[in-house]
Image (spheres, rainbow, N blue to C red):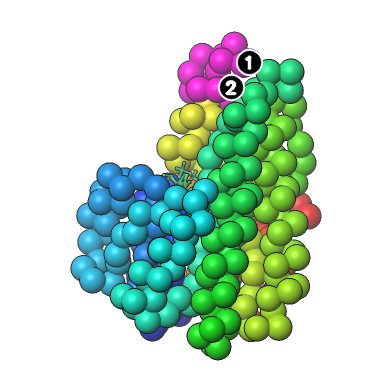
Amino acid sequence: MKLVDKVAVVTGGARGIGLAIAERYLAEGARVVVADVDTEAIDAGLVSLDAGERAIGRRLDVRDSASIDAMVASVQERFGTIDILVNNAAVFDMAPVLEVSEESFDRQFAVNVKGLFFTLQAVAAAMVEQGRGGAIINMASQAGRRGEALVSTYCATKAAVISLTQSCGLDLIRHGIRVNGIAPGVVDTPMWEEVDALFARYEGRPLGEKKRLVGEAVPMGRMGRPEDHAGAAVFLASEDSDYVVAQTLNVDGGNWMS
Ligand SMILES: NC(=O)c1ccc[n+]([C@@H]2O[C@H](COP(=O)([O-])OP(=O)(O)OC[C@H]3O[C@@H](n4cnc5c(N)ncnc54)[C@H](O)[C@@H]3O)[C@@H](O)[C@H]2O)c1
């Protein structure tokens, strides 16, 4: 029970890694806000969490600053505080460089970078006002550690997340707000179904083959599961990581070392 009395907002919390983190935070004693653009998925996520009034859902579109402000105000009204933000919402796309569209580029940067930054800014402002510090965890990716031929734009968004984690961490620590990140490797979530289908298209593979190959290539011998990231998310949100600032922690079965 490392998060008793804490209030945590998990963006993109309705499914995948975000939902697994929400579930673990509840088990650690926190109250949790599942904040997602997909309201049907929020409802399904809340049913699976089965946490009564300790888990609430809020529609949030991180591309829209009015939506971010409304979410923050509504959580403060309901729970009185925000202590933890897991900045997890993101979208994926890929294509050969010569085929990347401006729409795809803008969509990914709007959610993965701009949305992440302004959600961080709004929640950090609330935390400063509360005067009790806080913990912010940005979801990066191994894709942010190194470019990939077919994944130029998504990789760039995740490199930006690692950079923002460093700069925001250095700036906000004066307020007692610790900003850190998690870099997953390959994780079996709905996002990877989309990734697999896109690799099938661009590499001429049967559906499912890329997913199988990337799982086999992980030193640990399998893809990550959403819940594999929950322990790191508890660590970075709790007092156990009090002296950890502006870091991005690889949670990837050994794929990456940095
Ligand atoms: N799955 C992987 O292999 C993998 C690997 C490395 C990093 N990641 C990162 O981990 C995080 C979670 O990934 P996942 O695989 O669980 O993804 P997912 O696609 O399964 O879930 C993402 C969630 O974000 C929500 N979302 C999308 N756009 C939004 C918006 N504008 N506002 C609010 N919510 C929005 C979606 O509705 C969805 O519920 C992401 O940041 C992703 O980039 C995933």
Q: Residues within 10 Å of mark 2 (few under 14, many from 20)?
A: many
Q: Amino acid at mark 1?
A: Glu
Considering depth in this image, is 143 or 227 the residue closer to the camera?
143
Label 2 SS: helix
Q: Secondary structure at mark 1?
A: helix
- The residue carrying mark 1 is 203
* Residue 83 in picture, x, y percent from top left: 48, 77
- Which quarter shows the C terminus? bottom right
Question: Main SS of the magenta segment?
Answer: helix
Q: Which residues are magenta?
A: 197-213
How many marks the image carries: the answer is 2
To which residue does mark 2 refer? 199
Q: Residue furthest front?
A: 66
Residue 230: % across, % down: 48, 61
Q: Residues within 10 Å of mark 1 (few under 14, many from 20)?
A: few
- Left or right, 219 with respect to 226, comes to right
* Image-based side of 207 in relation to 170, left or right: left
Q: Are marks 2 and 1 in contact (CB under 8 Å)?
A: yes
Question: What residue is rendered at 43% in x and 37% in y?
Answer: 190
Q: Is residue 200 above or below residue 58?
A: above
Q: Nearer the viewer, residue 66 or 86?
A: 66
CA–CA distance in space, label 2 to label 1: 6 Å
Q: Is mark 2 within 8 Å of ligand 1?
A: no
Q: Quadrant of the N terminus?
A: bottom left
Q: Is residue 256 visible?
A: no
Q: Quadrant of the rendered structure where residue 97 is?
A: top right
Q: What amino acid is at disc 2?
A: Phe
Residue at 27% across, 57% down: 46
Q: Residue at x 45, y 41 (%)?
A: 189
- Residue 201 lies in the magenta-colored region: yes
